[in-house]
Image (cartoon, helix red, strand yellow):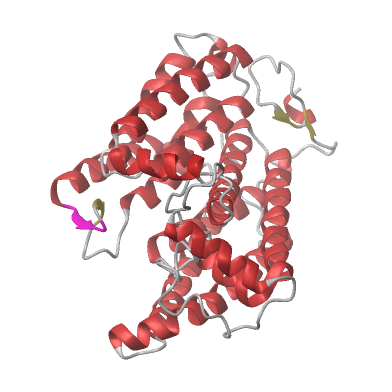
């Protein structure tokens, strides 16, 4: 039987994680205003148009975070199946009635809602429930790898049809990380990576737009012209140098960088705050990763462990992809920088994910082990590789 949360709510909140989140939000709001005031003035005659909307989304995200951290995280396990069913329905509905924007069908309600963002959170909840319920059977191909591959393949396929390769890849990579942490056999992971990688390679090859981005990326190392977007990203980063040109003083956001307040916001940050600002943001995400995995280590049950690890992997992988694209470390793809880029769906869902992390961190204390947790890359007899002594 589930035990109620401790009454002492305030003393069990992970305050370092809240400070990290608040810092990222503060940087994000500053950069959204700096990168969008010119565009807002030219298009809407309101320099603060995007800034005000981002503040509203941040407030909604804060409310969502408080709700998520106030609910016993185990409650979501009971609703994981209907939530997953609703998400699949929403993704299918999007392909039928969604509005096309920039050559893709990704949004509903005049571009204000992006179902694939919500899908990131819901699938993590469902996969955490599914993986933590398998135990030793997870190492069996018929109980582990095959149904896992079908589940993730269906979700990724619906997102690829939008098309949205970046989000599909992010979901697959996050799910594979959870599969490993939950205790899956290494051979299964290798097989899954080979088949999954091959499938994505074929899909990208058959997609003219995606394949052209891959060719542009490869060509950039052989002296060929670099994609315009990437070229301007790199130029903005070089212009910032170490100290940056100063907050608000950047010029690449003035119609040079496409989507300066969204996909390219890290380049604007690099120009205005320099290498110092970039390292500060990267350091904040590293701190977020540390707190997230610490919460996973100390989670009171296997579901909490896999769930916390999945939430952390999602946010960190997404940040890494955005930074890697901006620095031409991987082929160009549009994906927002969590808590920094402009975008309502991304911000609210990301903050809800942090709220769920906070919920895992604060309860229930009576089920926690008094001994320190540890990480084990070896076999765990069906238990997660992140494990505490209570589950040994």
Q: Residue at x 29, y 31 (%)?
A: 206
Q: Give coordinates of residue 40: x percent, y percent.
A: 36, 83
**Residue 309 to residue 354: above or below:** above
Task: Estimate the x, y position of residue 43 in percent, counting from the top left.
Answer: 29, 83
* x and y, in percent, of residue 277 in the image: 69, 70
* Residue 367 shows up from this direction: no
Q: What residue occupies the far right of the structure in this picture? A: 371
Identified at 66% across, 75% down, the residue is 273
Which residue does the image show at 31% across and 44% down from the upper left? 209
Nearest the eye: 305 or 9: 305
Magenta run includes residue 317: no
Picture residue at 62% right of the left edge, 55% below the top: 358
Displayed quadrant of residue 51:
bottom left
From the top left corner, tell me how far across and down residue 201 is, in percent: 41, 28
- Which of the two residues, 111 or 240, is positioned nearer the viewer here? 240
Front residue of 139/373: it is: 139
Above or below, 111 relative to 47: above
Using the rendered image of the protein, determine whether residue 124 is visible from the camera's viewpoint: yes
**Residue stretch in magenta:** 98-102
Snapshot quadrant of residue 161:
top left
């Amino acid at each position: 039987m589930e035990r109620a949360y401790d009454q002492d709510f305030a003393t069990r909140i992970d305050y370092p994680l809240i400070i990290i989140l608040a810092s990222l939000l503060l940087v994000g709001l500053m950069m959204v205003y700096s990168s969008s005031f010119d565009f807002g003035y030219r298009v809407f005659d309101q320099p603060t148009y995007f800034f005000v909307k981002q503040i509203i989304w941040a407030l909604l995200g804060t409310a969502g975070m408080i709700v998520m951290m106030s609910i016993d995280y185990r409650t979501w396990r009971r609703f994981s199946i209907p939530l997953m069913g609703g998400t699949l329905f929403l993704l299918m509905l999007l392909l039928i009635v969604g509005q096309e924007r920039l050559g893709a069908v990704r949004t509903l309600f005049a571009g204000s809602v992006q179902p694939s963002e919500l899908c990131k959170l819901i699938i993590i909840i469902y996969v955490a429930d599914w993986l933590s319920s398998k135990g030793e059977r997870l190492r069996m191909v018929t109980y582990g790898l095959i149904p896992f591959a079908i589940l993730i393949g269906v979700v990724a396929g619906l997102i690829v049809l939008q098309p949205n390769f970046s989000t599909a890849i992010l979901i697959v990579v996050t799910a594979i990380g959870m599969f490993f942490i939950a205790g899956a056999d290494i051979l299964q992971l290798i097989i899954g990576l080979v088949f999954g990688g091959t499938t994505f390679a074929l899909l990208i090859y058959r997609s003219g737009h995606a394949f052209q981005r891959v060719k542009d990326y490869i060509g950039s190392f052989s002296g060929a012209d670099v994609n315009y977007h990437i070229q301007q990203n790199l130029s903005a980063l070089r212009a910032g140098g170490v100290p940056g040109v100063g907050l608000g003083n950047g010029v690449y956001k003035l119609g040079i960088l496409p989507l300066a307040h969204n996909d390219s916001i890290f380049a604007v940050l690099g120009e205005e705050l320099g290498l110092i600002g970039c390292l500060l943001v990267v350091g904040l995400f590293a701190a977020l990763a540390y707190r997230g995995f610490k919460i996973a280590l100390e989670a009171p049950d296997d579901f909490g462990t896999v769930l916390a690890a999945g939430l952390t992997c999602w946010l960190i992988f997404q940040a890494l992809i955005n930074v890697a694209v901006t620095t031409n470390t991987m082929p160009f793809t549009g994906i927002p920088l969590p808590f920094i880029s402009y975008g309502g769906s991304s911000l609210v869902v990301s903050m809800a994910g942090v709220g769920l992390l906070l919920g895992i961190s604060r309860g229930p204390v009576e089920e926690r082990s008094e001994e320190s947790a540890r990480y084990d890359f070896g076999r765990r007899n069906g238990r997660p590789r992140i494990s505490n002594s209570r589950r040994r």
